[in-house]
Image (spheres, helix red, strand yellow):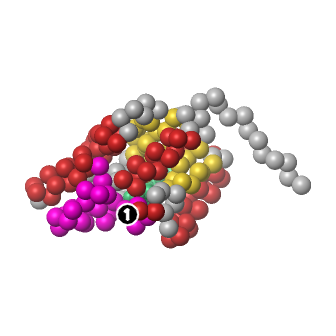
């Protein structure tokens, strides 16, 4: 029988929550809050070399994440917003993180997430922890939010106020 795999983990249990966050939504914030309840430090890490073509610039996405944190979780000093380019596992190693956090909303997320988690584990032996957001956010994603905002739909229940405002500004200019 294989011996149990036990590793000595650093005293500060730091985790990375990576994503494109274009823009951050209440679903992401729900996952961040749950991770923050479990770990000593959570880094919300914006992937800069995403294969997507984001609506918001890197700086705008970072600012919106920071503003959203202030708005929704003002007393959560152990949550930090940062960005990275290159491989997630290299960033996680540099930060001395013990795990990667990913949200698992619906079954269709599973295949992609499973593939990423296994590849990241193969590359750097890092664990991915899956967090289930509140079910009222399971159908949310940033594309739907951008689309609703573009056509003037009310998205106030799905995003923090700073994101709602920024989306309105963005689409009123276009
Ligand atoms: N609530 C609402 N929406 C959520 C959500 C939640 N809890 N969790 C995910 N989503 C949405 C996102 O808004 C996003 O929507 P969109 O596709 O409409 O923009 C979608 O689900 C998935 O996006 P996200 O969680 O941001 O992941 P991603 O697939 O954009 O990012 C990275 C994946 C950045 C983590 C991954 O590509 C990566 O690690 N890149 C770095 C390079 C690397 O290491 N590659 C090798 C990986 S093995």
For ligand 1, the image quadrant comes to bottom left
Tell me if mark 1 has few (under 14), some (14-19) or many (20+) residues whose alpha carbon lies within 10 angstroms of its own: some
Name the foreground residue: 49 vs 127: 127
Can residue 58 be seen in the rendering of this structure? no
Q: Is mark 1 within 8 Å of ligand 1?
A: yes
Where residue 26 sits in the image (x, y, percent)? 36, 53
The answer to whether 69 is drawn above or below residue 152 in the figure is: above
What is the span of residues highlighted in magenta in the rendered image? 137-160
Q: Residue at x 59, y 62 (%)?
A: 114
Q: Residue at x 31, y 66 (%)?
A: 144
Work out which quarter of the rendered image holds the N terminus and state it.
bottom right
In this figure, which residue is indicated by the disc labeled 1? 140
Q: Residue at x 40, y 49 (%)?
A: 29
Residue 140: which quarter of the image?
A: bottom left
Where residue 27 sits in the image (x, y, percent)? 40, 55
Work out which quarter of the rendered image holds the C terminus and state it.
bottom left
Q: Residue at x 29, y 44 (%)?
A: 64
In the image, is residue 151 part of the stretch drawn in magenta? yes
């Amino acid at each position: 029988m294989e011996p149990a795999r036990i590793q000595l983990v650093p005293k500060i249990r730091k985790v990375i929550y990576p994503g494109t966050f274009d823009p951050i939504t209440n679903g992401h914030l729900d996952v961040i809050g749950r991770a923050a309840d479990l770990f000593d430090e959570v880094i919300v890490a914006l992937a800069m070399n995403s294969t997507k073509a984001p609506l918001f610039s890197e700086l705008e996405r970072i600012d919106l994440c920071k503003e959203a944190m202030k708005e929704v979780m003002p007393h959560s000093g152990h949550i930090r917003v940062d960005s990275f380019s290159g491989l997630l596992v290299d960033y996680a190693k540099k930060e001395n993180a013990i795990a990667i956090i990913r949200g698992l909303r619906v079954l269709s997320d599973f295949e992609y997430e499973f593939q990423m988690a296994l590849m990241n584990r193969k590359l750097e032996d890092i664990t991915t922890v899956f967090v289930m957001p509140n079910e009222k956010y399971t159908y949310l994603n940033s594309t739907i939010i951008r689309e609703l905002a573009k056509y003037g739909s009310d998205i106030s229940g799905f995003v923090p106020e700073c994101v709602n405002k920024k989306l309105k500004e963005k689409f009123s200019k276009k």
